[in-house]
């Protein structure tokens, strides 16, 4: 199972690097600029890692269950149902903007382009605004999973980062640690890939990635185990 992914990664790298006389698209980085430094974790932050893992498991499971609940009503009537879902997501974005004054792009789209500006301006987000953002984007994420095509990676990363920013307002949790643990925990709940979740959080945090990695690992393990516990049991196939 790993070999096709490894081959695809090599081909994807050539697209950016180029081959022989063919120029590539140019090397890009996932690292988020402008974040404060992080030296080393402490005992309190490991306690927060457990809390963030539990919260991410609950939030991610709710998003997945919403998608599974809505999807049967969308299948077979996609032409009618997809516009309804789109209007609903637009309503969530409008509600968020009207109540917070923030850009609707925080709720719309994957979050890849909005992640950096949101973290750089984290001090300007109040806790109620972040909680409303989590609710609106989480519901929109679940609806889009049910009726639209697209990747689940960056919406999960954005939700985890926004949750980490919100929790970092509490004592004993720096912004960088909260964001990293939120990204890793929500990533593993939605992707079910623990190593990938840790790797994504490390790459996004760049120079702070290695220092915060022990915290990310704890939050990812807790979230992964709890999400598996909250998932419905697999259907029993009768013998024969």
Image: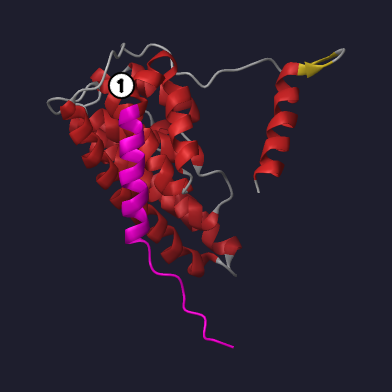
How would you rate the neighbour count of disc 1 (Cα within 10 Å): few for under 14, some for 14-19, many for 20 or more?
many
Q: Residue at point 58% right, 62% down?
A: 78
Q: Residue at point 39% right, 60% down?
A: 65
Residue 102 in view of the camera: no
Front in this rendered view, residue 74 or 101 = 74
Residue 191 horizontal/vertical position (percent): 48, 46
- Helix, strand or loop at label 1? It is helix
Which residue in the structure is indicated by mark 1? 176
Front in this rendered view, residue 104 or 65 = 65
Q: Residue at point 26% right, 47% down?
A: 54
Work out which residue is located at the far bottom of the displayed protein and give it: 240
Residue 48 in view of the camera: yes
Q: Say whether residue 122 is magenta.
A: no
Front in this rendered view, residue 79 or 183 = 183
Q: Say whether residue 219 is magenta.
A: yes
Which stretch is magenta?
214-240
Front in this rendered view, residue 239 or 149 = 239
In screen coordinates, is 21 left or right of 70?
right
Residue 15 horizontal/vertical position (percent): 74, 24
Q: Residue at point 69% right, 15% down?
A: 26
Callout count: 1
Residue 77 horizontal/vertical position (percent): 58, 68
Please tell me whether the stretch drawn in magenta is mainly helix, strand or loop.
helix
């Amino acid at each position: 199972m790993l070999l096709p992914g490894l081959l695809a990664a090599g081909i994807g790298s050539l697209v950016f690097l180029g081959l022989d006389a063919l120029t590539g698209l140019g090397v890009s980085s996932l690292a988020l600029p402008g974040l404060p430094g992080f030296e080393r974790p402490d005992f309190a932050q490991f306690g927060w890692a457990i809390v963030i893992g539990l919260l991410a498991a609950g939030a991610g499971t709710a998003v997945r269950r919403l998608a599974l609940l809505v999807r049967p009503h969308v299948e077979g009537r996609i032409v009618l149902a997809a516009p309804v879902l789109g209007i609903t997501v637009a309503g969530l974005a409008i509600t968020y903007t009207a109540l917070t004054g923030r850009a609707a792009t925080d709720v719309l789209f994957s979050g890849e382009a909005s992640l950096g500006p949101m973290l750089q301006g984290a001090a300007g987000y109040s806790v109620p605004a972040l909680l409303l953002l989590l609710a609106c984007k989480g519901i929109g994420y679940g609806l889009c999973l049910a009726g639209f095509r697209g990747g689940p990676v960056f919406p999960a990363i954005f939700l985890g980062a926004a949750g980490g920013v919100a929790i970092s307002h509490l004592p004993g949790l720096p912004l960088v640690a909260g964001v990293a643990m939120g990204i890793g925990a929500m990533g593993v709940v939605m992707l079910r890939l623990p190593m990938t979740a840790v790797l994504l959080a490390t790459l996004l945090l760049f120079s702070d990635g290695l220092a915060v990695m022990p915290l990310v690992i704890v939050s990812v393990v807790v979230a992964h185990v709890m999400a598996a516990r909250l998932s419905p049991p697999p259907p029993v196939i009768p013998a024969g």
